[in-house]
Amino acid sequence: EEEAFLVSLHQFMRERRTPIERIPHLGFKQINLWKIHKAVEKLGAYELVTGRRLWKNVYDELGGSPGSTSAATCTRRHYER
């Protein structure tokens, strides 16, 4: 399931002409694209996570540092890209 998701994601991004050339980082950790997808899905999908301002919860699910003040914003930006 994870591998199929990643293949599909990379194909989708190439078709949009915005290929994933490198995996983004939050802090010093590379983002696991599968985990961020599943975390957002678990919380009800993008619109709900955004509407309810749950991006900090997504960041926490990814194992982010608890002291980060820009965690929610950075997590959302990476997801949107």
Image (spheres, rainbow, N blue to C red):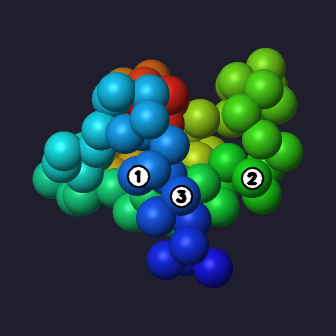
Residue 36 in the image: above or below residue 24 = below
For this orientation, the residue located farthest to the front is 15
* Residue 8: mark: 3
Residue 69's image quarter? Answer: top left
Residues 21 and 52: in front is: 21
* N-term-proximal mark, 1 vs 2: 1
Q: Nearer the viewer, mark 1 or mark 2?
A: 1
* Image-based side of 22 in relation to 11, left or right: left
Give how far apart the Cα atoms at labels 1 and 2 are: 18 Å
Task: Tell whether label 1 touches label 3 (CB within 8 Å).
Answer: yes
Local crowd size for mark 3, using a 10 Å CA cut-off: few (<14), some (14–19), many (≥20): few
Residue 73 in the image: above or below residue 4 = above
Q: Name the residue: 37% across, 39% down.
A: 14
Residues 46 and 75: in front is: 46
Judge whether residue 59 can be spotted in this image: no
**Residue topped by disc 2:** 41
- Under circle 1, the secondary element is helix
Q: Amino acid at mark 2?
A: Glu
Residue 26 on image: x %, y %: 28, 45
